Image: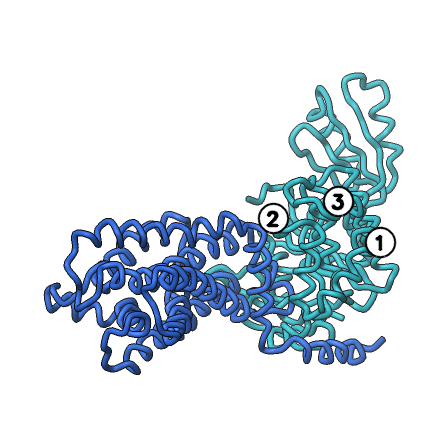
Chain colours: A cyan, B blue
Amino acid sequence: MLTVEHLHKRYGALEVVRDVSFHVPVGQCFGLLGPNGAGKTTTLRCCLGLTQPDAGSIRLVGLPIPQKAREARLRVGVVPQFDNLDPDFTVTENLIVFGRYFGLSRRECEARVGRLLEFAGLTDKADARIEALSGGMKRRLTLARAMINDPQVLFMDEPTTGLDPQARHLVWDRLKTLVTEGRTIVLTTHFMDEAQRLCDRVAIMDQGVLIAEDAPRTLIEREIEPVVIEVYGEGVERWFHTYGKTLSSRAELAGDTAFCYCVDPEPLMKTLEGQRELRALRRAANLEDVFLKLTGRDLRD
Amino acid sequence: MTEAAIASPATDTSRRVSRWRFAHVVYRNYLVWRKLIGSALVGHLADPLIWLVGLGFGLGRLMPPIGGLRYIEFLASGMLCYSAMNSASFEGLWSAFTRLKVQRTWESILNAPMTVADVVIGEWVWCALKGTLSAAAILLVMALLGIVQTPLALWVLPIALVVGLAFGGLALIITALAKSYDTFTYYFSLLLMPMTLISGVFFPIDQLPKIVQTAAQFLPLVHATTLARALAVGTPVDNILLHVAVLVFYAVATVVIAAKLVERRLMR
């Protein structure tokens, strides 16, 4: 459905995408993860033909990009990172006007609006103005707008950034429905729980390079020990140097918290018994651990 | 499902989305305009009409005839072009910039199967339609005041359309380069207003220094006022084709440049 091979893109002296290759088969949800500035958005823009790559080849819905980008976008829906709903129109008008850009007649658009509003949970907001919508409603409307042409592939750039937990769960639920219908989804995110929950496959990108790609579960098993113990509290530093480092397979101290990655957590747990000042959290390894291991803990701004 | 099977419906649908795609952008702007029709009519129609009547009768009382025309007769055809220019410029500057930068409307359109050229041509045509509408309102008042008497005067409307295209195109160039709305104030005050004063809108230019007259010939507005005056009130005119050619040149050249600049700005 989407094949990217040896993609390069530079802005001036800065190469923001370096030799990126991946493939998204039909019906999969594919997540592109990475810290801010990793090149995720630029990669998506290249895939949609919204920017010229410097090298590499892209095929989307069987068509070469950017040569046939406009034709490809007939079968594609896009949820951009920033809402660009039309504030001059109502909810319904936004959908109809957007459908016209796909060459749909007014009648075809009107016929689709009802179902899309239902899908987005906005039926009772059909005639509301955009400024009257909450952030979550706007995001859902943007998603509904991206569905007006009944697309085979959906591109979503950070679909749940800025949403509260209720709104995020609703968006996730809708995205799962879309995948169940056989649609392909390509999304970027820096929420690891989102990626782990939604994506069949994820690729982690950092400084323009794809550094890992696999199913979330496989990545976790391959990169991280199964159990993580987080320890914090008075005297954590001393504990970390005495026990944490030696009794785990891998450990690091970040700020006030020690992260210990273990295959067998029991010896380490024993050293915490009776340590009243220390608090410990024992949990399963997750995608965020993989992400932090591969991209480091430094801030990226 | 194979990828080839997926590709075929895309080609089928694309036949329906023709080279008239820019019309979707015109239609979008029309729908918004229709919602705000009250303020749109007052701002872009009533305003120049008040100026025309006020200046024409007020100042006109003090003025000797110009080339055999009463002042209001002279002024009206100038105001007609000025008004077409103003309407098209406002639309291509403030309104288009709002859609480009503030509302990101153009970006959303580019996520659909539309190109930068579709967007820019749509905006360009829309600017010209708004300019023509302003001109038409003035023409109507001219008819009501008995200033125009021949149906030949209706030919000023296509002239107004080309004036709208020329200034719409220029405005879109400025918009494509602008960082903020402030730029437009400079464009209006430092370029459009001085040009208006040397283009025969409010007074004839033959008393101006020769060099200023020559300079004006390289700008579009004087060609519009010359043509409009000839059509509306029958002043003699030479070189009709040259006047039309300059306007058409401005219209086409500016939209091509504007499309390139918007492409550079949005498709990076």
Q: Which mark is residue B17?
A: none
Residue B246: x %, y % from top left? 31, 76
Q: Label 2 is placed on what type of residue?
A: Pro
* Residue holding disc 2: A87
Q: Which mark is residue A176?
A: 1
- The residue closer to the viewer here, A4 or A63, is A63
Q: Is residue A23 left or right of residue B71?
A: right
Question: Would you say residue A165 is visible in this rendering?
Answer: yes
* Residue B92, quarter of the rendered image: bottom left
* Residue holding disc 3: A125
Instruction: Tell me which numbered mark, 2 or 1, is placed earlier along the sequence.
Output: 2
A257 in relation to B101, above or below: above
**Residue in the picture at 15% in, 65% down:** B212
| Label 1: which secondary element | helix
A296 in relation to A113, above or below: above
Distance (Cα) linking label 1 and label 3: 23 Å
